[in-house]
Image: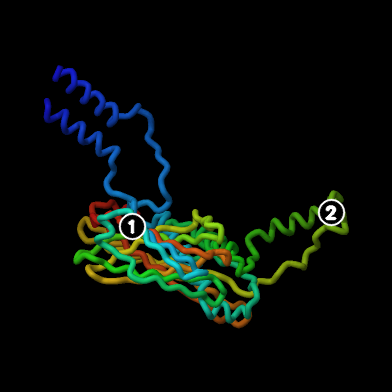
Amino acid sequence: MKTSVTCFLCLTSLVILTGCGGPRVYESELDRRPITSRLEAQDIRRTVEKMAESLIADDAVVAATAGQKPVLDIEPMKNRTAMSVDMKSITDSVRTRLIRSRLFRFVDRSTTGADIAIMDEQAQLGLTDPKKAIRPGQQLAAQMYLTGTLTDITTRLGRTVDHYYKFTMILKDLRSGEIIWTDEQEIRKFARREKLDR
Amino acid sequence: MKLFALAACLLAMSQFVGCYSTAGTSAVLNHNTGESVLFEGNTTLRNRIAVTAVTYDKVASGMNRVNFQLASQVQKEIHLQYRIAWFNSEGMEIDGDSRTYRPLIVQGLDSVTVTGVANSPNAVTSRIRIREWDSSH
């Protein structure tokens, strides 16, 4: 009796531990625990949230816009690290947050080629009502633009790797050249026995 | 053999139990009335961190802002995560996916203030949720 119970327990444990043999894929929460000392998705999300909050809460930004919704553009952040990070994605996420706040308006220089192509088609193909076709020369002009930099310091001592990352963002007035707002997000992570293969 | 079976069972159980509880402490503030409510869902965490003050105001752009003061109740450094969420007048969370858990390290018996700014002019209630994080650092 005892032997059969023990065998049953062992087999049950074995099934649980080995699974069905297929790949194990799980959904993960977005703010999961770090698995590396490198920049991870949760670091980017926190940075974006902090920057958007800081910009919305800044008195100087509100004063500079004089109660109006300013028109902003983004200049992708500069990556001064050796890592490959999609910097445009970060500024895009900040832009999404700011648009959702309904305090800012944005134009996008990166899609002007598509704008012109669509306008040309509307004017030349004859498919669009000429009275309703959009003509060039009516788009809003950006008053300010948002940009920034990512820098890092990496220290390695034995098998311990220490990473320090700093995101700096600025909002610059295009007319005056003045920096209206700036903020930083610092992230420090360290890992023991991590391979540094970059 | 018995020892092996016991070890296997314990190992299997650990697959289901997980490493730590994600239930935590929450504080909810109604920005229209100033009324705040505290929920403590984890006795271990309650004995380690306390929400000692809640203040609120509006930033220049008109968005609500909230400050939560947290005080450590223990002498050791504690690793926490907190998330500040915003809700509209109907009690629905606004843009919940974009609100992140931020790391917070509190030194022994120290107190810190964390701040959140609403992500919409419709936000009238704020809630901080604090959970304990992996302390094996």
Binning the other alpha carbons within 10 Å of mark 1 as few (below 14), some (14 to 19) or many (20 upward) gives: some
- Residue at point 63% right, 80% down? A66
| Rendered residue at 21%/32% (across/down) | B9
Element marked by disc 2: helix
User: Which quadrant: the C terminus of chain B?
Assistant: bottom left
The N terminus of chain B, quarter of image: top left
The answer to which of B79 and B73 lies nearer the viewer is: B73
Q: Is residue B31 visible?
A: yes
Residue A82 visible in this rendered orientation of the protein = no
Q: Which residue is drawn at the image coordinates 54% and 71% (left, top)?
A: B63
Q: In which quarter of the image is residue B130?
A: bottom left
Amino acid found under the numbered disc labelled 1: Glu
- Horizontal side of residue A172 vs A28, given as left or right: right
Residue B91 spot, x, y in % from top left: 52, 57
On whether disc 1 and disc 2 are found on a single subunit, the reply is no
Which amino acid does the dot numbered 2 rest on?
Gln
Vertical relation: A130 (above or below) A5 = below
As rendered, which of A81 and B63 lies closer to the eye? B63
Q: Residue B5: where, in percent of width, then height?
A: 16, 28
Q: Where is residue A99 in the image (x, y as percent from the top left)?
A: 60, 63
Q: Position of residue B38 (x, y in %)?
A: 37, 62
Q: Distance between the residues labelled 1 and 2?
A: 66 Å
Tell me the subunit letter for badge 1: B
CA neighbours of label 2 inside 10 A, class few (<14), some (14 to 19), many (20+): few
Q: Do the residues labelled 1 and 2 touch (CB within 8 Å)?
A: no
Q: Mark 2 points at which residue?
A: A124
- At a point 48% along the width and 75% down the height, the residue shown is B57
* Disc sitting over residue A181 in the figure: none
Q: Which mark is residue B40?
A: 1
Instruction: Give the secondary structure at mark 1.
Output: strand
